Amino acid sequence: MTAATLAATPSSPHVMNTYGRLPLALTHGQGCRVWDTNGREYLDALGGIAVNTLGHNHPKLVPALQDQIAKLIHCSNYYHVTNQEVLASMLVERSGLTNVFFCSTGLEANEAALKLARKFGHDKGIDRPEIVVYDKAFHGRSIATLSATGNPKVQAGFGPLVEGFIRVPVNSIEALKAATANNPNVVAVFLEAIQGEGGVQPFHMDYLREVRALCDERDWLLMIDEVQCGMGRTGKWFAHQWAGIQPDVMPLAKGLGSGVPIGAVVAGPKAAQIFQPGNHGTTFGGNPLSMRAGVETIRIMEEEGLLDNAAKVGAHLKAGLEKALSLELANGGVKEIRGQGLMLGIELSKPCGVLLQQAADAGLLMSVTADTVVRLVPPLILTTTEADEIVSILCPLISNFLKEAA
């Protein structure tokens, strides 16, 4: 089967049928543009699902990765990997935390966070530790992270789920206090600063501060999943920093390596020494290639001012969407446009999965999450001109969809 054939085929007979793919295959990219096997150009407002921080074929990243591939790709954690120390120091400096464990994916990072919380509890003499998680959360698809996830659709067919989770609604400190009252087994609160798969749903800054205070009061770990909303996407290194707080445990992945698989768990003093040799590990985590990708990603982000760019262009994009969809916002067809920086969600009044193909046909890549939310997470190099192009392509599609669905 050729690439051209694949581009027109919904699924390969030899690949497990686990994704609802669009019938196109991409071959190459440049900046915020990608091309398919038929030579068609698209504006990439999905960024590999918040992964391609620096866009495609970045002139500084590509030579650095080529240099690293020619030297050493993998060597295992039996040996020191110099750039682990370099990247760990960079993350510690930007987060205010103290130590880092490297893995390969966001799922792995979240799984490690759950293990840290349980070990934290066992070290305190708690035999059955419990962790607070949230409605509509998404932390991964392993059995443990799936159990922490708040989406019955993705959990269906995989029971029995792992015990030890207490689920609460978003942004209600009273609900959190009520759900944990007189429970000595609670060891941690685990949340996304902005829920990604849950519909680009931000936690309120006041709520984050209240949870931080409650964790301090009750000797719980505050674990903030920054896998999707971290690494500069909101205009700060990590989305929780807008609240002026620090977590005890912070899983990262996605944008940290600009497309090279990488995950990390950054921990503060309360959690940094919980794991000891033999408690946790990974084959691929912290390999020389992924570490170089992380180091170069942060270096280039700072050289090019991409945190400021994410804030500026994100605000421009959001304002453009609000203006173009003002009628739909007024009549309720668009319920809300929310998010921060270059992590935006447009919630419609009805399921809108058909917009995926319509947008691709119009030359725009984006996604629909939580059934009714158009998600935009483009590369952080996006320009205001490209933001205007997203608005000009996407908003007429949304307007027409809502008219036809009325």
Image (cartoon, helix red, strand yellow):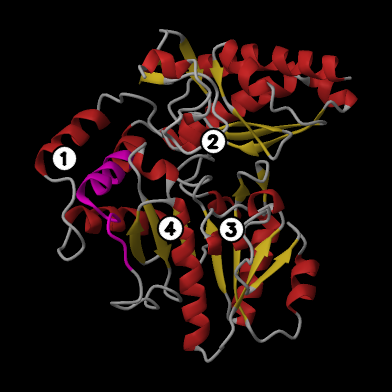
Residue, x 72% and y 56% (percent of image)?
135
Q: Earlier in the sequence, mark 1 or mark 4?
A: 1
Where is residue 389? Give x, y as percent.
57, 13
Tag 3 residue: 146
Label placed on residue 256: none
Where is residue 316? Give x, y as percent.
60, 24
Q: Position of 101 compared to 50: left or right?
A: left
Q: Earlier in the sequence, mark 2 or mark 1?
A: 2
Name the residue type under label 4: Glu
Q: What is the CA distance from the residue labelled 1 to the residue labelled 4?
A: 24 Å
Closer mark to the observer between disc 2 and disc 1: 2
Nearer to us in this view, 357 or 262: 357
Closer mark to the observer between disc 1 and disc 4: 4
Name the residue type under label 2: Tyr
Q: What is the CA distance from the residue labelled 3 to the residue labelled 2?
A: 17 Å
Residue extending farthest to the bottom is 125
Q: Earlier in the sequence, mark 3 or mark 4?
A: 4
Q: Earlier in the sequence, mark 2 or mark 4?
A: 2
Where is residue 132? Give x, y as percent.
65, 69
Q: Position of 12 compared to 81: left or right?
A: right
CB atoms at circles 2 and 1 under 8 Å apart? no
Tag 2 residue: 19
Q: Badge 1, how many Cα within 10 Å: few under 14, some, many 20+?
A: some
- Span of residues in magenta: 281-297
Q: Badge 4, how many Cα within 10 Å: few under 14, some, many 20+?
A: many
Closer mark to the observer between disc 3 and disc 1: 3
Residue, x 80% and y 68% (percent of image)?
174
CB atoms at circles 3 and 1 under 8 Å apart? no
Nearer to us in this view, 80 or 25: 25
